[in-house]
Image (cartoon, grey):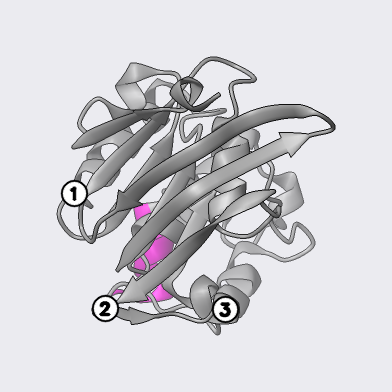
């Protein structure tokens, strides 16, 4: 899967967050989107996937050189961010049964395998609202790591993770290299230093 960004621009009120941004994200490669707090990293990620509209330019998703309709793009990607909420009234088992009606688990994995991989086996019957912030973040990351989606977008991926969680993140995100199109938005080098390419969002003011 390939994402082409053509002359993209986004502004709030009269201030341009980024402008004249031309780049492409190629199948099975890894990219870091970097910049300080408030530089527009998260805005760029949200614009790519259509959460917020751009003010100019276009984004084209293709699979085997065939353009994917905008309303079908979600079927091919996972996005993990601090600002996306889980359905917290569900238990973990209920949530995963619901989620994987719309997405496919990595081939060969069961839901029980998934639960063990995110280290939540002893908590699978608890409502997600009773999870710690770190447990929720591992669950979110697992949805991207262990699905069959072609694209994985991670925004500030180690938010709320402890030392164990960070090591778990690094082990699993590196296992995706060369297997998925991976885009990581971060200002912490440890989260993305293994990526093939780096895009500095501040270069597009």
Query: What residue is rendered at 34% in x and 34% in y?
Result: 32
Given residues 192 and 135, the one toward you in this image is 192
Residue 77, horizontal then vertical, whole percent: 44, 65
Q: Earlier in the sequence, mark 2 or mark 1?
A: 2
Given residues 144 and 115, the one toward you in this image is 144
Q: Quadrant of the C terminus?
A: top right
Query: What residue is rendered at 45% in x and 27% in y?
Result: 186
Q: Is residue 190 above or below residue 141?
A: above
Q: Secondary structure at mark 1?
A: loop
Residue 116, horizontal then vertical, whole percent: 37, 57
> Disc 3 to disc 1, how far (Cα)?
27 Å
Q: Earlier in the sequence, mark 3 or mark 2?
A: 2
Left or right: residue 168 versus residue 153 is: left
Left or right: residue 54 versus residue 175 is: right
- Which quadrant holds residue 192? top left
Q: Residues within 10 Å of mark 3 (few under 14, many from 20)?
A: few
Q: Residues within 10 Å of mark 2 (few under 14, many from 20)?
A: few
Q: Is residue 98 above or below residue 128?
A: below
Q: Secondary structure at mark 2?
A: loop
State which mark lies toward you, 2 or 1: 2
Q: Residues within 10 Å of mark 1 (few under 14, many from 20)?
A: some
Q: Earlier in the sequence, mark 3 or mark 1?
A: 3
Q: Which residues are magenta?
A: 109-117
State which mark lies toward you, 3 or 1: 1
Picture disc at residue 65: 2
Q: Are marks 3 and 1 in contact (CB under 8 Å)?
A: no
Picture disc at residue 177: 1
Q: Which residue is mark 3?
A: 97
**Residue 49 falls within the magenta-colored stretch:** no
> Disc 2 to disc 1, how far (Cα)?
22 Å
């Amino acid at each position: 899967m390939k994402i082409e960004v053509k002359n993209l621009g986004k502004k709030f009120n009269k201030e341009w967050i980024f402008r004249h941004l031309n780049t492409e994200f190629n199948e099975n490669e890894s990219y870091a989107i970097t910049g300080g707090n408030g530089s527009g990293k998260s805005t760029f990620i949200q614009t790519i996937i259509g959460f917020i509209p751009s003010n100019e330019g276009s984004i084209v998703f293709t699979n085997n050189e065939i353009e994917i309709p905008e309303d079908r793009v979600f079927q091919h990607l996972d996005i993990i961010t601090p600002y996306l909420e889980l359905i917290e009234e569900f238990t973990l088992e209920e949530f995963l049964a619901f989620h994987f009606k719309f997405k496919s688990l990595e081939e060969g994995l069961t839901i029980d395998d998934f639960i063990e991989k995110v280290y939540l086996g002893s908590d699978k019957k608890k409502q997600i609202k009773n999870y710690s912030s770190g447990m929720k973040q591992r669950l979110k990351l697992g949805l991207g790591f262990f699905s069959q989606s072609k694209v994985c977008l991670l925004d500030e991926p180690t938010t709320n993770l402890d030392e164990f969680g960070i090591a778990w993140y690094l082990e699993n995100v590196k296992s995706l290299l060369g297997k998925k199109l991976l885009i990581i938005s971060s200002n912490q080098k440890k989260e993305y230093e293994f990526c093939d390419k780096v895009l500095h969002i501040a270069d597009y003011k």
